[in-house]
Image (spheres, rainbow, N blue to C red):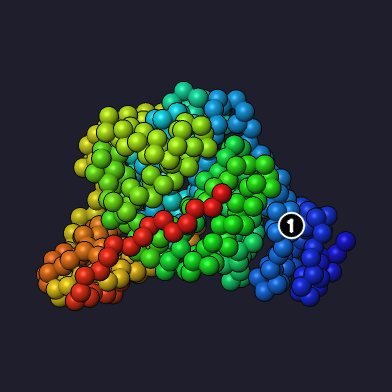
């Protein structure tokens, strides 16, 4: 078998066999197939696509390129949640403690951020001492003992994906549905969960900018999950504006804590509840959607969800006092308010420029090696549908310097568009697939 022949085959729009895909992924993972040939294959796939059978085979080959975690020693139905990413997406920080407090074991592998804000691991490190570099034994013990653990992905968890994603990122081949789906699902399947809930973002702040593409991506991932014998549900959610009000690291942790205290933004809570509903149903911890929603609201109201966050932080070496006194979280010293230029209603609030503002402040990474400033960020004061008066604060910016704050302010102001007439609040949940 020769790689050049497989490239030619896919270039001509032909279907690769399971044996060919498995040989290709194995060879690339071992370093036997060079980057330039795999780059050519990715580009051929980008333009020619893959069938569902090819996509499932690719996913399984990537899953089996390294370790597959055995979570059978953890009692209960393990339900994993994954988001395709967006601006202000701190969902795991609130959702994990909520469902864990209701008996759903949360055994989650997460990564660091690359782009406008940090990833879940970066946010968790806002708690001094918190570590996601824990052994597999500690990881499983924590889930069994307190119901939740989050660890960084091991080097040998779907290593084919790690190599392939880095290659796609540098060859303009990221945004292809089969490649996105196989990348996400290979890691989810290698993580050992029993069931998977997917949050597929759509809008100007997401990979998929239109509903048709988002639905297609969601359906592919659901089909992959089912093909692997996992119950898989997907939600298509709105990312035309940032999720919640906070965009950054410490500020997002603060918002997650406030959400667990019952003070979360409505749009953020709507997404958290929608995802949590599916996690509870798949885990057999709720009898109906109404029952699931009632239980989630109750665990917030009685303080159990917040207590679960304290236990989670402490179990992984973090300082739980920050949960009770989030004012201890680091915030950059330069505070600037972005003022509304006119009266009216917020018509649009594009997520992408807000994400770029966070990058300018230092809250994200341009490369995997970039340092990240946990203390900078933006807190949105007005969102789509809100009435504003000239001079009202649209956003509070936390920056290290006045120059950085000014640059971020221009990005933030450019994200807003106003209307003289009333604007309705946007729909957050577009569709559910299962």
Q: Is residue 114 left or right of residue 218?
A: left
Residue 76, placed above or below residue 130: above
The residue where tag 1 is placed is 53
Residue 333 coordinates in the image, percent (x, y): 20, 55
Residue 132 in view, yes or no = no
Label 1 SS: helix
- Name the residue at 77% across, 61% down: 33
Quarter of the rendering containing residue 86:
bottom left
The residue lying furthest to the right in this view is 1
Q: Is residue 22 left or right of residue 204?
A: right
- Name the residue at 46% across, 63% down: 202
Nearest to the observer: residue 405 or residue 224: 224
Residue 406 coordinates in the image, percent (x, y): 23, 70
Quarter of the rendering containing residue 244:
bottom left
Residue 405, placed above or below residue 53: below
Nearest to the observer: residue 163 or residue 93: 93
Nearest to the observer: residue 398 or residue 149: 149
Quarter in which the N terminus is drawn: bottom right
How many numbered markers are drawn? 1
Task: Classify 10 Å Cα crowding around label 1: few (below 14), some (14-19), many (20 and above).
Answer: some
Residue 350 coordinates in the image, percent (x, y): 34, 69
- Name the residue at 25% across, 60% down: 380
Residue 259, placed above or below residue 32: above
Residue 240, placed above or below residue 184: below
The residue lying furthest to the top in this view is 145
Residue 416 coordinates in the image, percent (x, y): 27, 72
- Name the residue at 43% across, 66% down: 203
Residue 230 in view, yes or no = yes
């Amino acid at each position: 078998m020769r790689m050049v022949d497989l490239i030619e085959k896919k270039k001509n729009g032909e279907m690769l066999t399971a044996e060919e895909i498995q040989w290709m992924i194995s060879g690339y993972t071992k370093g036997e197939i060079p980057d330039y040939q795999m780059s050519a294959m990715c580009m051929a796939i980008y333009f020619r696509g893959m069938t569902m059978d090819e996509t499932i085979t690719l996913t399984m080959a990537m899953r089996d390129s390294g370790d597959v975690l055995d979570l059978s020693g953890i009692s209960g139905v393990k339900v994993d949640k994954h988001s395709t990413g967006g601006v202000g997406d701190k969902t795991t920080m609130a959702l994990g403690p909520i469902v864990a407090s209701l008996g759903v074991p949360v055994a989650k592998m997460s990564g660091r951020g690359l782009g406008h804000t940090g990833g879940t691991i970066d946010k968790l490190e806002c708690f001094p001492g918190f570590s996601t570099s824990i052994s597999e034994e500690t990881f499983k013990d924590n889930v069994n003992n307190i119901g939740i653990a989050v660890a960084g992905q091991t080097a040998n968890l779907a290593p084919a994906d790690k190599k392939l994603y880095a290659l796609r990122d540098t060859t303009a081949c990221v945004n292809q549905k089969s490649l996105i789906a196989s990348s996400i699902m290979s890691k989810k399947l290698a993580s050992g969960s029993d069931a998977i809930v997917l949050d597929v973002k759509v809008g100007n702040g997401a990979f998929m900018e239109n509903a048709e593409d988002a639905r297609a991506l969601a359906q592919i991932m659901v089909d992959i999950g089912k093909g692997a014998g996992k119950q898989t549900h997907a939600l298509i959610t709105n990312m035309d504006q940032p999720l919640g009000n906070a965009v950054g690291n410490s500020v997002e942790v603060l918002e997650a804590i406030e959400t667990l205290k019952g003070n979360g933004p409505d749009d953020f809570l709507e997404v958290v509840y929608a995802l949590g509903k599916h996690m509870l149903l798949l885990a057999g911890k709720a009898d109906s959607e109404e029952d699931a929603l009632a239980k989630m609201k109750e665990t917030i109201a009685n303080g159990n969800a917040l207590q679960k966050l304290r236990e989670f932080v402490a179990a992984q070496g973090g300082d739980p006092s920050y949960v009770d006194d989030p004012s201890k979280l680091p915030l950059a010293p330069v505070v600037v308010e972005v003022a509304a230029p006119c009266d009216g209603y917020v018509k649009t609030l594009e997520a992408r420029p807000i994400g770029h503002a966070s990058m300018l402040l230092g809250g994200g990474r341009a490369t995997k090696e970039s340092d990240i400033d946990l203390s900078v960020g933006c807190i949105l004061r007005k969102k789509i549908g809100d009435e504003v008066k000239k001079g009202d604060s649209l956003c509070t910016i936390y920056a290290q310097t006045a120059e950085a704050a000014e640059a971020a302010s221009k990005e933030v102001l450019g994200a807003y568009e106003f209307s003289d007439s009333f604007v309705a609040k946007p729909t957050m949940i577009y569709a559910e697939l299962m």
